[in-house]
Image (cartoon, rainbow, N blue to C red):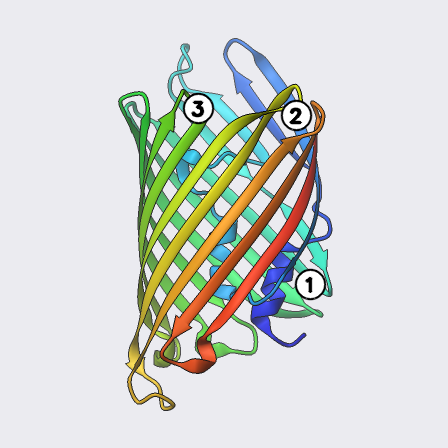
Amino acid sequence: MNNITTAISALVLSALAALPSAVFAAGPSSGVVYSGDLQFNLGYGEEIAANEADQKLTAEGQTNLLNDGFKLVLPLDSMGTNTSTATLDPALMGAMGLSAEFVSADISQNFQPLAVGLSHTSLEANYLGDQFLSLKQWSPHLTGFIGENVSVRTDYTQSQKSLGGRPGRDANVDSLGANISWFINGAKAYFSLGAKYDTEDAVDPEHDFNANTIKLKLAKHFPFMTRSGIIKLGASYEQRLYKNGISELGEPREEGRTRYQAELELPLTQQLQLIVNAEFADHESNFAEAENTKYVTGAELNFSF
């Protein structure tokens, strides 16, 4: 497996094991609560591009329902209305000769009605002992509510990525994003609409591009046995325009990337949860070698305590 794009699919979506993580919360009235979860993941996928790793590793704002790892909440006043939150998610994953060290941190402050925060993500991935991806991100973000049922989030992300053995693909990426979510029937369902603009500056000018992306997401709780399951459906379209021509085309490269995602969360017991997911993506391009269709399926078993 010498294809970097295939390797990243196994790394991000087909990790056979993840180390335990824990969640800690402190509040002025509840004392300290300790909890954690143990995860086992199994999946299969083809052709997941390395530059999509950040989409798999970063949170999707207020509507993100998964927050594994180490979390510390410190109240700043006696009422606990203003808090600072720090989250640290360490993971060491291995599959098919792949290994990765992934750390993310987020610090936020609630100034009601707005919350201001700063996130950092770092990923170091190796294949058969050689580095093939290094990714570092910084992202200030702003979140607020409009009324009781609408959440709005904006963010700026600065990324630095390096691909081992392909120095021309090393790049700095600047991104601007916005997301609005409507919560229906309390938090039992929500619909999310997001947009993002990316500009990538690579070592080799051939890989410089601008991209516009629009995303849709729907999540809904439903009765399952004596508990509540969750179904999530998502779709996105990215229009990418490369800034410079390539010799094979004699003109700038253009791409359209469509993606569909589905995820089902099923609580088997109070502590045990099964997550099944699937993804299909299609890449169209005026450069024939860049066109491809890809799919990913996976299952995850979480044990909380």
Kindly identify which residue carries mark 2. Answer: 35
The answer to whether one can see residue 69 in this image is no
Tell me which numbered mark, 3 or 1, is placed earlier along the sequence: 1
Q: Is residue 181 above or below residue 34?
A: below
Q: Amino acid at mark 1?
A: Leu
Work out how far the residue at label 2 is from the one at label 1, CA to CA, in angstroms.
29 Å
Q: Which mark is residue 98?
A: 1
Q: Amino acid at mark 2?
A: Ser
The part of the image, by quadrant, that contains residue 2 is: bottom right
Work out how far the residue at label 3 is from the one at label 1, CA to CA, in angstroms.
38 Å
The part of the image, by quadrant, that contains residue 5 is: bottom right
Report helix, strand or loop for mark 2.
Answer: strand
Q: Residue at x 64, y 47 (%)?
A: 91
Residue 286 % position (x, y): 36, 79
Q: Which mark is residue 187?
A: 3
Report helix, strand or loop for mark 3.
Answer: loop
Q: Residue at x 43, y 35 (%)?
A: 63
Name the mark nearer the viewer: 3 or 2.
3
